[in-house]
Amino acid sequence: NAGVTQTPKFQVLKTGQSMTLQCAQDMNHNSMYWYRQDPGMGLRLIYYSASEGTTDKGEVPNGYNVSRLNKREFSLRLESAAPSQTSVYFCASMSPGLQPQHFGDGTRLSIL
Amino acid sequence: AQKVTQAQTEISVVEKEDVTLDCVYETRDTTYYLFWYKQPPSGELVFLIRRNSFDEQNEISGRYSWNFQKSTSSFNFTITASQVVDSAVYFCALSDVYSGGGADGLTFGKGTHLIIQP
């Protein structure tokens, strides 16, 4: 009963490197989300996917790309990492209507 | 645009005291959901409650209670007889009903850091 699984849990990158954060859910949810959390801030939405094959920008999409590979998986890619992208990244999933969003445990990303 | 304000950045109380965390929201939607999440020091997000905008009844769950007042756009959270294990950051969040957040996802407040001293 894993819920939402994020990998990796921790990562350190150098400026300009690329990386993909992975997220998978086993609850058969249609909607998936990527958020970032910065110190003293709440979570802010990066990208959203209502279903397989569809993605939409959230509040802070610049510098990121996403792929909804199938119903289970939603990945977040940093093409050229910048120090401003140092953050904790959370993936979430939800079945529209009745359920709250279920969150993964987060990926702590540091960019030097 | 939706907005959630948690004016209390940090609250520190002594164990066994009651404490209330404030949440004020703004939305143009007539139907929406409100949430509270807990983020303990370990970092994960723990869902506490969801409230539909149609339902203004207060809710109690053990030592936790929630006061939803649509007239003042507030959804406050009270912990009675606080314990050290309640120490965490608490987030209030808002979403519209029909898409469960849609393109906006959840709109979060900045959180209140609650410190319960023994």
Image: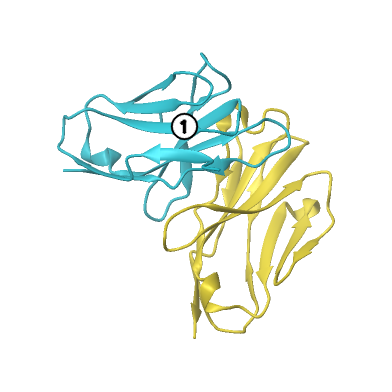
Chain colours: A cyan, B yellow
Closer-to-camera residue (B98/A28) = A28
Given the current orientation, which residue lies at the most extreme top position? Answer: A53
Residue B72 quadrant: bottom right
Q: Residue at x 40, y 27 (%)?
A: A75
Q: Which chain's residue wears label 1?
A: A
Residue A15 seen in render = yes
Vertical order, B22 against A98 (above or below): below
Name the quadrant of the N terminus of chain B: top right
| Residue that badge 1 annotates | A24
Vertical order, A70 against A85 (above or below): above
Q: Residue at x 47, y 49 (%)?
A: A42
Identify the secondary structure beneath mark 1. strand
Question: For the residue marked with disc 1, what is the amino acid?
Answer: Ala
Residue B24 percent location from the top left of the image:
65, 54
Residue A59 seen in render = no
Q: Is residue A77 left or right of residue B50?
A: left
